[in-house]
Amino acid sequence: MRLLAALDLRLLRLLRTRGHTPPVEAAVLRLAQAGENGLLWQLIALGGAVLGGRWRRPGFFRAMKIVLAALVVNTVVKQTVRRARPVLEEELPALTPVLSGRSYPSAHSSTSFAGARALAAAGLPAPPLYAVAVAMALSRPYLGVHYPSDIAAGAILGDAIGRFMTP
């Protein structure tokens, strides 16, 4: 168990210290803000429901429900596990405020992978959806607010919820 915790911390430090320039940090911050509470995925689904035609509308509404379910389940797990957010030395503070002091699993990751699966099932192309989901998940340790294991658990949880709720 200590080996996994050490690896988690090492990966967090790597993501928190590499590739940090002001323009990249600004872009990652905007992406993470768009992912709060699954907002980006809800907006994509809403856009699909409005623009996708009557026959595709149910799939997009289902995607909205799946993203919301992922957020709710994630919150329950987060409050049950109660893992504190990472704290690196003072020279590496988190780059964004957070809504909760709880870290495991990542809600950005859960809602992103649930959203990607559900929106792909609704007819949108899967590769760009999953590319955004991966970027969203990686934004969290990059910003210093999640351990890599938090985003992995969130991705697994979100994908499982999406798989379970998608016909």
Image (tube, helix red, strand yellow):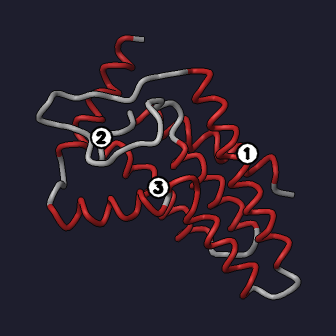
| Mark 2 burial class by Cα count in 10 Å: few <14, some 14-19, many 20+ | many
Q: In the image, residue 134 lies at what x, y percent?
A: 46, 55
- Closer to the eye: label 2 or 1: 2
Residue located beneath label 1 in the image:
161
Q: Earlier in the sequence, mark 1 or mark 3?
A: 3
Q: Earlier in the sequence, mark 2 or mark 1?
A: 2
| Residue named by callout 3 | 134
Residue 25 in percent (x, y) is at: 24, 59
Callout 2: SS: loop
Specify the amino acid type for callout 3. Answer: Val
Q: Circle 3 sits in a helix, a strand or a loop, which is it?
A: helix
User: CB under 8 Å between callouts 1 and 3?
Assistant: no
Judging by the rendered image, the residue that carries numbered circle 2 is 144
Q: Which of the image's four quarters has the N terminus?
A: top left
Q: Which mark is residue 37?
A: none
How much space separates mark 1 and mark 3, taking CA atoms? 17 Å
User: What is the spatial separation of the Cα atoms under label 2 and label 1, in whole angstroms?
Assistant: 26 Å
Q: Amino acid at mark 2?
A: Gly
Q: Position of 61 compared to 119: left or right? A: right
Q: Of the residues shown, which amino acid type is indicated by label 1?
A: Ile
| Horizontal and vertical percent position of residue 66 | 74, 54
Question: Where 164 falls versus 31 (above or below)?
Answer: above
